Image (tube, rainbow, N blue to C red):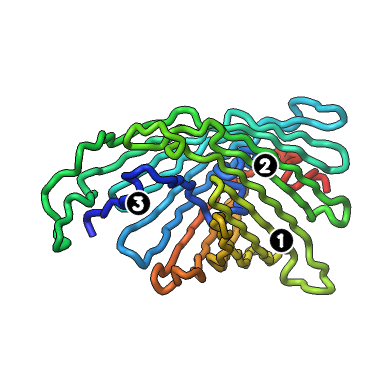
Amino acid sequence: MKRFILIILIIVNVNTYAQDYSFSQFDLNMLYSNPAFAGYENDNRILIHRRNQWAGISEKFNSNIIELNLSGDISSARFGRGKISWAGGVYLIEDHENLVFKEYNIGIIPWTFHFQLPKNFFISMGMQNVISYHTLDWSKLIFSDQIDALGLVTNQSSANIPIYDKYTNWFDPSVGFIITKNGFQQNYDQSSSVGFAVHHLNRMIESFYNNQASTSKLPVKYTIHAQHKGNVPNVISRTFKYWKVFARHERQAKYMKKDEVGFSTILSNNLQMEFGTIYRIGRFISDNSILMSESIIPLVRIRMKPSKRIGMEMSYSYDFNISKLQNINTLATHEINLNFYFIKRKPRPCPAIGNWKN
């Protein structure tokens, strides 16, 4: 299918709202989801992630992200009885729907501060700005006035509509916070965190018609996420050493909400593997709120250390659609992730692990 039929709803003035793309493996500490994740771990990191959505239909919906996560030195400043570290990062997201619509986002995180407090508490605060560039190929669109009574496409051009084939947004700020609590002594490998992020504070215009109405503004997005990691006693299992449970609540505009919860277990052998499942619920809020089960998402990860100073993590997940859309119609939604960790010679306390002396 080389051409799209342009839905009439985006031509007339109706209450339609844009929505951000979303990745299923939300527990990967992506800078895109919360700028406070910059420097959250001890080591510098490069993340490469690809989402191929609904492979069963001819029109492709793909999102790709690459990010550079830089961690700072926590001994550079003091905060009461604790310490402060600085971190930053940058990411690039490429998103496209077939060959018609393409979007590029560059997220710049100039600073994220991690405050180390007594009793192994950490508070992380970050800010970012996103620069986005959008393009639209009008030649691949079919308008309603180009379809005759027999359903055939004619060469008649669409009625006088002001057309723009690209636009750029330069100022799209976001902020994020994370509170982390790490364990002590024999429970040092246990940790809990809860975070909150607000995106699109500027509510920039997203329109190829230069439409300045409120429906052309990207809605503010609110994200709440939490995670707890615990260890499995040897008397229960010597194979599965760790387990974690994680959740995310996301809301954008007054009509769209999404909830996800996941659970995974981690092997403690030399070749570390993680197996888990994520369950996603979508909500469309109107006069009668509709609660809909969307997907069950199994995932598998493998971690290895190819060299003394480099760690590597590979991850794969599959979205099995259980909504009315049905998996047989959409088939697979794949996500593939590759992480490279550049291990520092001098470890530092960090929110993800706590004090390394434990």
Across and down, in percent, residue 239 comes to 72, 71
Q: Residues at badges 3 and 1 in contact (C-beta under 8 Å)?
A: no
Residue 244 numbered tag: 1
Residue at (11%, 49%) from the top-left corner? 155
Q: How far apart, in angstroms, are the residues tagged by discs 3 and 2?
A: 33 Å
Task: Report the residue marked by disc 2.
Answer: 40
Across and down, in percent, residue 140 comes to 22, 49
Q: How far apart, in angstroms, are the residues tagged by discs 3 and 1?
A: 34 Å
Q: Earlier in the sequence, mark 3 or mark 2?
A: 2
Q: Is residue 143 left or right of residue 131?
A: left
Query: Which residue type does callout 3 highlight?
Result: Glu
Observer able to see residue 301: no
Task: Please determine whether, in this image, residue 272 is positioned above or below residue 348.
Answer: below
Quarter of the rendering containing residue 25: bottom right
Residue at (29%, 42%) from the top-left corner? 136
Query: Which residue type does callout 2 highlight?
Result: Tyr
* Mark 2 residue crowding within 10 angstroms, few (<14) / some (14–19) / many (20+): many
Q: Residues at badges 3 and 2 in contact (C-beta under 8 Å)?
A: no
Task: Report the residue marked by disc 3.
Answer: 97
Q: How far apart, in angstroms, are the residues tagged by discs 2 and 1?
A: 17 Å
Observer able to see residue 167: yes
Task: Please determine whether, in this image, residue 194 is positioned above or below residue 334.
Answer: above
